[in-house]
């Protein structure tokens, strides 16, 4: 029986840091994996940190091929949608995502992680995020209205027992910058048509437009995922960190294609008010698989 990384399902955390690394020397991938797998969270009841550790799928397959799903790959090419819209590929070799109740302990642990990995990997991207009005993103809408309950989330997010990569998950990590001035200039009714939901109660519109965000990412059509999105940024520039876990990569990739207008020629209206800045897929292995790397 394989066990998922607990940080995947650690809801309620308000401070987050995403650390993305690239190998300094491809020949030292085993040393990097061993160093990452040896990371330990603080052993306290009030200042705890949750970790989610992920690897570029191709790198993970090189490390433990018997524990790697065969049909998962990195975000290795940009998505070219209709009307000149693109989603960039910024695939990195490894991810350490830290979350907790306060940023001071996240800050200290992030420094420790970067220091411990310095001989094997370069910190290429660091993004800090935080909760906003409990469960809303910086557009003012509730984020994750279709998320499964924690009782059901494992079935959507984790590879099944008995197959390579069991209890692991495919993680899509994207940074989206909001065109906030343009967005806030829209009447609320138009914002709701773009989202496909009401802004206050997050009720799905019965007559939602076909280009609404809800319509273009319909999980009943593409498959269900488990989202842990968070706001990021400063007053001047900010947006959403998309953090999506899935038992199948195709659920995530098809949603991105749909948003870009590659499924039926209809582009997601929300992409006119948000700009994708990054895109990576990571395989998040089970606890037992990580332990094999130490």
Image: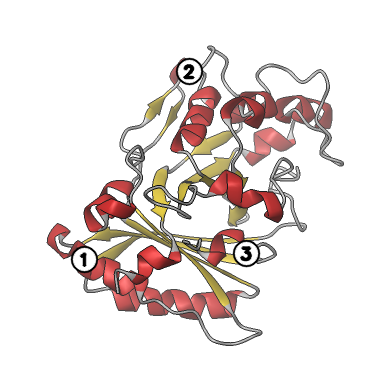
Q: As displayed, is residue 43 above or below residue 232?
A: below
Identify the residue position indicated by label 1 in the image.
30
Q: Position of residue 281 (x, y in %)?
A: 40, 45
Distance, label 3 to label 1, CA atoms, is 28 Å
Q: As displayed, is residue 67 above or below residue 250?
A: below
Residue at coordinates 52% horizontally, 84% vertically from top-left? 42
Secondary structure beneath label 1:
helix
Identify the residue position indicated by label 2 in the image.
262
Looking at the picture, the colour scheme in use is secondary structure
Q: Position of residue 165 (x, y in %)?
A: 39, 51
Q: Residue furthest right?
A: 201
Secondary structure beneath label 2:
loop
Dot 1, crowdedness within 10 Å: few (<14), some or many (≥20)?
some
Tell me which label, 1 or 2, sits earlier in the chain: 1
The reply to whether discs 1 and 2 touch (Cβ–Cβ < 8 Å) is: no
Q: Residue furthest top?
A: 265
Residue at coordinates 81% horizontally, 39% vertically from top-left? 202
Identify the residue position indicated by label 3 in the image.
10
Task: Select label 2 or label 3 by which is in front.
Answer: 3
The reply to whether discs 3 and 1 touch (Cβ–Cβ < 8 Å) is: no
Secondary structure beneath label 3:
loop
Q: Position of residue 258 (x, y in %)?
A: 53, 23
């Amino acid at each position: 029986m394989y066990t998922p990384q607990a940080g995947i399902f650690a809801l309620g955390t308000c401070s987050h840091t995403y650390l993305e690394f690239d190998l300094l020397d491809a020949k030292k991938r085993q040393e990097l994996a061993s160093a990452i797998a040896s990371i330990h969270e603080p052993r306290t009841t009030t200042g705890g940190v949750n970790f989610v550790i992920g690897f570029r799928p191709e790198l993970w397959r090189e490390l433990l091929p018997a524990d790697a799903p065969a049909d998962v790959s990195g975000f290795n090419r940009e998505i070219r949608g209709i009307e000149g819209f693109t989603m960039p590929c910024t695939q990195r070799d490894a991810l350490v995502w830290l979350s907790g109740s306060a940023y001071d302990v996240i800050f200290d642990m992030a420094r420790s992680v970067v220091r411990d990995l310095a001989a094997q990997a370069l910190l290429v991207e660091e993004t800090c995020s935080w909760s906003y009005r409990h469960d809303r993103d910086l557009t003012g809408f509730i984020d994750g209205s279709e998320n499964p309950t924690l009782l059901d989330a494992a079935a959507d997010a984790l590879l099944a027992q008995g197959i390579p990569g069991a209890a692991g998950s495919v993680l899509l990590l994207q940074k989206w910058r909001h065109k906030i001035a343009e967005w806030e200039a829209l009447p609320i009714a138009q914002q709701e048509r773009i989202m496909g939901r009401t802004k206050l109660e997050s009720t799905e519109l019965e007559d939602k437009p076909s280009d609404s965000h809800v319509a273009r990412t319909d999980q009943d059509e593409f498959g269900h995922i488990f989202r842990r999105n968070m706001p990021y940024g400063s007053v001047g520039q900010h947006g959403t960190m998309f953090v999506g876990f899935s038992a199948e990569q195709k659920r995530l990739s098809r949603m991105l294609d749909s948003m870009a207008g590659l499924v039926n020629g209809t582009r997601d209206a929300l992409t006119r008010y948000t700009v994708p800045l990054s895109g990576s897929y990571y395989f998040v292995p089970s606890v037992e698989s990580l332990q094999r790397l130490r």
